[in-house]
Amino acid sequence: MPLDRRTFLGTSAATGVALAAGASAQAAAAEPAAAGAAGKGRVKRYSFTVMGTTDLHGNVFNWDYFTDKEFDDKAHNDVGLAKISTLVNQVREEKGRRNTLLIDAGDTIQGTQLSYYYAKVDPITAARGPVHPMAQAMNRIGYDAAALGNHEFNYGIPVLRKFEEQCDFPLLGANALDAKTQRPAFAPYSMHRLRTPHGRDVKVAVLGLTNPGIAIWDKANVQGKMTFPGLEEQAAKWVPKLRSMGADVVIVSAHSGSSGTSSYGDQLPYIENAAGLVAEQVPGIDAILVGHAHTEIPEYFVTNKETGEQVVLSEPLKWGQRLTLFDFDLVWSKGRWTVEKVAAKVLNSNAVDEDPAITGLLGDEHEKVVAYVNQVIGTSLAAMSTAEGPYKDVPIIDLISHVQAETVKAALAGGSYAALPVISQASCFSRTAAIPAGEVTIRDAAGLYPFENTLEARLITGAQLKEYLEYSARYYVQTPAGAAVDPAKLTNAENIPDYNYDAVYGVTYEIDIAKPAGSRIANLRFEGKALDPAAEFVLAVNNYRASGGGNFPHVPGAKQLWSNSEEIRNTIIQWVTAKGTVDPAAFASVDWKLTRDGVPVF
């Protein structure tokens, strides 16, 4: 794969983008007099602000395409770049545009039906195709740089490259390497020059780092094309280079959480959530914009082991719900600018209105997608909901597994594995997904599966299935028999998210939550008989799980019998369209239940 035109070793193009931004900043009208003002006496001081977003996931409008109404949650958060734009405008008005930068930490082009539509339905890669709504919005707002997220690779490298081409700012990924040359496949960094009132410019370097888990999660799209080494080792390579190039301030935009944990276990020698380790191990970093973990961290300090210096980290909440502000105070000393102080905080986007410049820019695209998702594709004989899906076997999750099992059976028909029983895994991806009684639309069906996962068939044994289920059952908090059960506090043990709890369709079993994790699965049966540990099954499984996502045992190493490039979400939509009628009686069954000492919890 050829190197990107903006990449290697700084690339004058990346610097040119920064200089152009600086020039336009100079031309900005009426900067506040206080911004960047000198301190008392002869000491030269300068202050500036770096704003940051992350995990925007295709959100431009404060709109939920799956519910077809304005977004809302229990905390009354708002979402979208239109809200972020208003906050950015306010900060620029307060600080002075030339005293600010705006960056992002990745996961930009996947997550809503708006972003899906322009990747798949009316793709940006088509001849004379449209400009991606996220590129349009981010260009209008005036982003200076964005790191690559792992979900940038979900639609394949051609879509990502087209999106990159449409952006007026560089996409950064110092640890996204060309598989053949081991050189950066994207710009590793961007350099930005801020003009101070003192005639001494400040050079701000932004180093982009992405997630090594891409090699597992999007194996089909990147294998043999790109590799993704660890964040710490690449930061240790690039930060000294940036300093030697005259960077006064080094900021890392890292699509990697701060906790030092990984969901893919020991499958790669790299840590998934390594931002805190980067701050601790690599000297010369002033601040890190954190992404990927979908948590809110207004301000978090990590001490660098080598220098003893404090590095400030901040992670704004996902989907444009928060905007991080890093406020830098610099002093001119011994012929150079030195960072004297850095503070961080987040602003809440629910405190402002949407910017009409953004909603007006993309109003047509929004309406087109709303019309698309509201197309009627069938009729349901009963209402179904995922509300109780994390702790009960509900029909709507069975629908996912039934469609997957049918699809795999059809794919294997007439082959050497056609006689084997097919079982299926599924998770509750959203606790608010629902299919109403009556008309079923695309958004109803798509809401069951918000991720771009595809379907595979893997060969496993009964013994392996038992261990798989035991691993999944760690999700529940151990609850003694007789103790009160609060469904709101029963799940997410060890901070396991809902999407990493799998229920398996086609066998029956109990999960005894009074017992410790690892010994909870009881009465595991197939067709009414105790499961034979040596029996072979075909597991219909999504590619995330099959590739090691969640670190479930056995499946990543199991023999692949079949795989498909079609998103499971589309497979569900096509199934409903073909059937015309969704009848829970045809597929719903209680295959699993929670118990304590053999007594059902519900």
Image: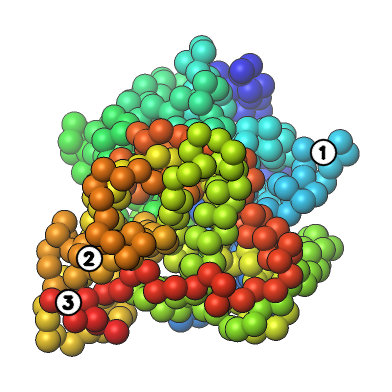
- Given contact means CB atoms under 8 Å apart, are the residues at marks 1 and 2 in contact? no
Question: Which residue position is annotated with label 2?
Answer: 523
Give the secondary structure at mark 1: loop
- Crowdedness near tag 1: few (<14), some (14–19) or many (≥20) residues, C-alpha within 10 Å: few
Quick one: label 3, few (<14), some, or many (20+) residues within 10 Å?
A: some
Q: 557 or 38: which is nearer to us?
A: 557
Q: Amino acid at mark 3?
A: Gly
Q: Identify the residue position indicated by label 1 in the image.
A: 126
Q: Position of residue 166 (x, y in %)?
A: 74, 39
Percent coordinates x, y for residue 184 in the rendering = 52, 22
The nearer-to-camera label among 1 and 3 is: 3
Above or below 351: residue 569? above
Q: Mark 1 or mark 2: which is in front?
A: 2
Amino acid of disc 2: Asn
Residue identifier under label 3: 598
In the rendered image, which quarter contains the C terminus?
bottom left
Spatial CA span between label 1 and label 3: 57 Å
Q: Earlier in the sequence, mark 1 or mark 3?
A: 1
Q: Gap in Å between the C-alphas at discs 1 and 2?
A: 53 Å
Q: Earlier in the sequence, mark 3 or mark 2?
A: 2
Q: Nearer the viewer, residue 334 or 486?
A: 486
Image quadrant holding the N terminus, namely: top right
Tell me the quarter of the picture where residue 306 sits.
top left
**Front residue of 213 and 10:** 213
Q: Residue at x 29, y 71 (%)?
A: 491
| Callout 2 secondary element | strand
**Is residue 377 left or right of 197 when viewed as pictured?**
right
